Image (cartoon, coloured by chain):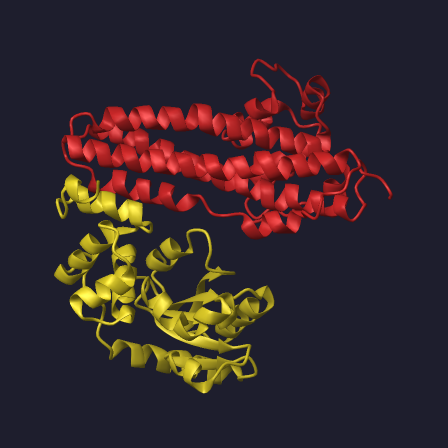
Amino acid sequence: MGQEIMITPSMKLADLIELNYRLLDVMSRLGVGLGFGEHTIADACRNCGISESSFLLICNEYACNGYVPSGELLASASVADIMKYLHNSHIHYMDSEMETLRLSLRELMAPADEAQRKVVEKFFLDYKAEVKNHFSYEEDVVFPYVEALLAGKSGNGYSIAQFEENHSNIDEKLNDLKNIVMKYLPDVCDPLLRNRVLYHIFCLEEDLHHHTLIEDNVLVPMVDLMEKGLSAEYGER
Amino acid sequence: MGTDNRKNVLLIMPSALVARGFESVFSDLGEFRVHGVLADLSNGAEVRLKNIGADVIVVDPVVFEYASRANARSLISQYSDAAVVGLRTISMSEDAWKQFDEVVDIYDAPPVIVRKLRAAMTSRSETPRTEGEELSAREKEILVCVAKGMLNKEIADYYSISIHTVITHRKNITRKTGIRTVAGLTVYALLNNLIDYSSIE
């Protein structure tokens, strides 16, 4: 299960995408656009001002199942980079993914009864609100806490362990939606469109799963190191 | 079907060492083979349990939360009809061990392990299988109550059944439909014409 191919700074971006094309989304959230020619990961990191360790951590966690980052890599990466990536991901999920999914669900449900349309729409909006709420906690509580740590201030009694404890699952409703679209929508719904919506849900589900892994396996241990005064950025106390 | 008619064993245990130990015992003695190993029961493990087609499951109860260990067997049975063997790595009450078809101790000799797995399969084949995948009439009634926002206690009182029975029905509804949240069950109920929109507004 572990990582079969190690992602290294000298790897070409094009080869990285060949390795796992789902990294396309990751690239855009890191600020790396297409049209990169023969650039390597190291070139891309230099161009967009992100540390190589941060880049490797994110890509490995995303592309390799069961990846456990080494303490060395965690200590040399930049927590600001990781937060920026997570923040960009939040924006991407809320503004792009959720909106696209809402519109395609609406199109899919258009031929159904009014009550059926309304109940599916309401379910989706509840789900979207739940996800937004989940992200807001990270944006409003966790990230400011980490920024304060970076600025050398204390956390006012908060610690990253609390985040780990309260890190709720937002995958249940999406899983329900998947089952509903796959198994229970009325026959009047267009089959091709239904497939498209399903593909989208499967991709989003996987994407969000990796997003959570980056939070739990990269952000949390890095902040933990900072709290102990061991990270490169935070320095010795 | 081929010459290899060894029985498939699914191991659910966090210790890679112990899992390798089982593989080694089976490769020495034949009859069984390790068909899959799950280190825990998170992330889609239900789907794997359902579809892996194991004849015997060997589970280390430590993969369950403390409070649910006594129900380990029924939790697994929701997803698989395989015989379930407990692996004694921790101490639990004797009653808790009785839920399993057999119990293997980590100090058992290899032939004893194989004999116990064989016995577990025999005892399992004598018990009736679970019913089909469609919701039963009673499950549909319970589902409607859930969709309308009733609590387990209210449903139990309404049908004069125990809360435990309500919970079992709800587990079966979730197992069959794949839907876990109340909001999702409400959508299911409406799409299947079990309730009107007016009753959920």
**Which is nearer the eye, A91 or A115?**
A115
Residue B120 horizontal side relative to residue B18, left or right: left
Q: Position of residue A232 (x, y in %)?
A: 81, 38
Q: Residue furthest right?
A: A236
In the rendered image, is residue A199 in sight? yes
Q: Is residue A66 left or right of residue A132?
A: right
Residue A65 or residue A138, whichever sits in front = A138
Measuring 25% from the left and 69% from the top, which residue is drawn there? B165
Q: Is residue A222 above or below residue A117?
A: below
Name the foreground residue: A115 vs A81. A115
* Residue B38 in the figure: left or right of residue A174: right
Determine whether B166 is above or below A78 in the image.
below
Q: Chain B, which colour?
A: yellow
Q: Position of residue A66 (x, y in %)?
A: 57, 48
* The one of B189 and A144 positioned closer to us in this rendering: A144
The percent coordinates of residue B191 (x first, y second) are 17, 41
Residue B199 screen position, x and y as percent: 17, 44
* Residue at horizontal 15 percent and vertical 40 percent from the top: B198
Taking the spot 28% from the left edge, 58% from the top edge, the residue there is B151
Q: Residue at x 59, y 26 (%)?
A: A15
Q: Quadrant of residue B51?
A: bottom left
Task: Locate residue A107: give its quadrant.
Answer: top left
Task: In the rendered view, tell whether residue A55 sits above or below residue B141.
Answer: above
Q: Which chain is red?
A: A
Q: Is residue A186 above or below residue A217?
A: above
